[in-house]
Amino acid sequence: MLREYDDVSANAGLQHEADVEAGFLADYVPLDQSTVLMLGILELLHAEHKAGRAQVSLAVLCKRLGIRMSTLQRLMTALSEQTLVEVFTQKARLVATLTAAGQDVAQALQTA
């Protein structure tokens, strides 16, 4: 009788752990590197904006993030499609600025 109880208890404990883990995994989605970099771009642009520099050259962003220009341009395209940043040419160089929606997202990241 005790042996049956131990088997049932052990199985119930394993089931409970599986339920907790499944719930946890369903709520947790790891961020890929592109997402992390895009969040970093938003944070950098927000910090520059707060410091009085609304526009930042893409070359500066590349240096600060330690990524290649082609990677940055791909990420900026994705952020532009979401209307979070604007990229344009100023004095023969590419610069980026946050949109109002980008400001809101960057501000939310700061408070999170």
Image (cartoon, rainbow, N blue to C red):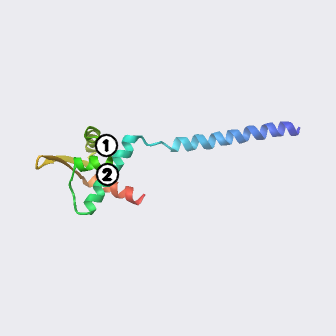
Q: Is residue 22 left or right of residue 93?
A: right
Image quarter for residue 50?
A: bottom left
- Is there any visible trace of residue 84 in the rendered image? no
**Image coords of residue 35 (percent x, y):** 38, 43
> What residue is disc 2 on?
42
Question: Which image quadrant: the C terminus?
Answer: bottom left
Question: Which image quadrant: the N terminus?
Answer: top right
**Which numbered disc, 1 or 2, marks the residue that appears first in the sequence?**
2
Q: Is residue 99 left or right of residue 108?
A: left
Picture residue at 30% right of the left edge, 50% below the top: 64
Q: Amino acid at mark 2?
A: Leu
Foreground: 18 or 59? 59
Of helix, strand and loop, which one carries label 1? Answer: loop
Q: Name the disc covering residue 4, or none.
A: none
Q: CA distance from mark 1 to mark 2?
A: 15 Å
**Image coords of residue 3 (percent x, y):** 86, 37
Which residue in the rendered view is the most extreme toward the right?
1
Picture residue at 42% right of the left edge, 40% below the top: 32
Within 10 Å of the Cα at label 1, are there few (<14), some (14-19), or many (20+) other Cα atoms?
few
**Image coords of residue 43 (percent x, y):** 33, 54
Q: Is residue 98 left or right of residue 108?
A: left
Q: Amino acid at mark 1?
A: Ile
Within 10 Å of the Cα at label 2, are there few (<14), some (14-19), or many (20+) other Cα atoms?
many
Of helix, strand and loop, which one carries label 2? Answer: helix
Asked if residue 72 is positioned above or below residue 97 in the image, the reply reads above
Foreground: 86 or 40? 40
> What residue is disc 1 on?
67
Report the mark closest to the observer, 1 or 2: 1
CB contact under 8 Å: marks 1 and 2:
no
- Is there any visible trace of residue 69 in the rendered image? yes
